Amino acid sequence: MSELHIHGLGSIDDVTLEFGRGLTVVTGETGAGKTMVVTGLSLLFGGRADQGRVRAGVRAGVEGRLVLPPDSPVWARAADAGAEPDEDGSLILARTFSAEGRSRAHLGGRSVPVGVVAELAEEVLAVHGQTDQLRLTRPAEQRRALDRYAGAEHLALVQEHRAAHVIWRRLADDLDRRRGQARELAQAADVLRHGLEEIAAVAPEPGEDVDLDTLAKRLGDADALRSVADTARLALVGDVTGDLGGDGDLPQDATSALATAERALAGSDDPTLVLLAQDLADAVAVVSDVGVQLASYVADLDADPARLAEVLDRRAALTALVRKYADAGEGLAGVLAWSADAADRLSQLDVSDEALATLEAERDAARAELAALSARVTAGRQAAAEGFAAEVGEELAGLAMKNAQVSFRIDTDVDQPGPDGADEVVLLLSPHPGAPARPVHKGASGGELSRVMLAIEVVFAGADPVPVMVFDEVDAGVGGQAAGEIGRRLARLAREHQVVVVTHLAQVAAFADTHLVVDKSPDTALGVTATDIRAVRDEDRVRELARMLSGLADSDTGQAHARELLAVAAERGR
């Protein structure tokens, strides 16, 4: 991310932020709007918009410029959306919002669904904030963190366990339902069985109703249809069979006329007339073929009252089924659909001893498969727990919790497996020697909790493939030596990633490669409070660090301390 432009969002009227390589920190007075930078990034990549943050009467917008390597998977997804790189080879993202809550997203000059840019975020951006820390205090989230640490193969195993759990629960619930509602299900099955037997007795075929309608009309109109067909046959080929009572005075038929014309032209020496004669010969063949088909039609068209009565009876039987089992307008197809659905439902209502025994065997087999998967998931978590706790402990040692010990307690209940396994995972913390290990959300102070959660974030962030990482005040409740260690760790991450940190700690800000300051001041002309973001360097940066340390930007003591922090950060960040 090389540039971020925010317009009309919250207290920000119009600002452009330029991010450098490495570590960028965002600082400012409390309430100045530092977190709007994080909000802007989140919105740019598909985050949900809060219409309350959009200034009245304006259309808010966020625009970002991504500089990506040629092999980034983002390019392929962008190309699928029709996006194109900018002139300098970067990729432009933009999103606009109205006060009514509507938003639009653009990628590489093309309008795209918000979901497209949200997909890109998975490859580009990872946001770590206080919300993530609070979420990690929950046992379920601690279990997910351990699963994530265990690796892709273990995560695939957990996913397989979820699918097996769904199958087992479906079979178990079905068996319980059939046993508990045997009488009601048997009655419902009788109704379905009666309907299926009634339909089977008639044995309708797909499309049979349409065919019967056509046949009934033909049988009922046999005499009229025969007259029409004979008239046409006579006009085409004449009374060649004599069954029309011809006496020699019939008009010349089409076949004879065409043949006469063909013979007349065929005897000519003119090439054009010879070609036309061939066309006439073809026409004679077509007319003769139609005459043969009409003769066949007439031969098959018998006035058969008995057959007509049979057809009408069959059609009445089908109509009765349609009236009883099909919705309006569905016809016989609705009857067949009801039959197929009823057969499927009947198989689920079977409460016979044989059906229940079969279902019980299927349930037990699914339960055995689930138990085997649960055991593998548990083994994977136990194998990963020690390594994960050790890495978190190493990070805590550098965060002024040198003697703290972190461990996982994995309680397994094989009789009550859940979708994610049979384990309850709890992260335990012993803050100092002799202290009992207690669940981290119960036994840690606010500062200790922040450091534990930051240590977990750092463990994960180091292996995170995304190029841009954002940390939103994850150093809350931390100070002193631990604050400096946080800054050093973030600077270390910034060697491999672009890291953006919103912080209130001068010890963290001192490690920055780029330092952005958020200023907030009343705008009397517009009657609103405006926010500006500026990059600080040299003495301006010293003044900002002094303000963060002592609250007095012009304090000589504060500035001296700020210069010392910068020198220490430069030395330790090497």
Image (cartoon, grey):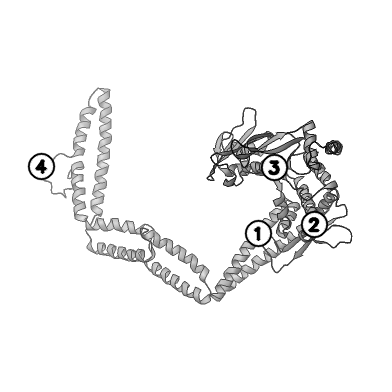
Q: Crowding at label 2, few (<14), some or many (≥20) Cα neighbours within 10 Å? A: few
Q: From this viewpoint, which residue is outermost toward the top?
A: 270
Secondary structure beneath label 3 = loop
Q: From this viewpoint, which residue is outermost toward the right?
A: 433
Q: Which of marks 1 and 4 is nearer the N terminus?
A: 1
- The residue indicated by pointer 3 is 34
Secondary structure beneath label 4 = loop
- State the separation of the CA atoms marked 1 and 2: 35 Å
Give coordinates of residue 70: x percent, y percent: 68, 33
- The residue indicated by pointer 4 is 249
Give coordinates of residue 508: x percent, y percent: 79, 42
Give coordinates of residue 391: x percent, y percent: 82, 51
Please say whether residue 334 is visible from this viewpoint.
yes
**Closer to the camera, 406 or 453?**
453
Q: Which of marks 2 and 3 is nearer the N terminus?
A: 3
Amino acid beneath label 1: Arg
The mark lying in front, picked from 1 and 3, is 3
Q: Earlier in the sequence, mark 2 or mark 4?
A: 4
Image quadrant containing the N terminus: top right
Which mark, by number, is residue 445? 2
Residue at x-position 70% and y-position 59%: 140
- The residue indicated by pointer 1 is 162
Amino acid beneath label 3: Lys
- Which picture quadrant has residue 200? bottom left
Q: Earlier in the sequence, mark 1 or mark 3?
A: 3
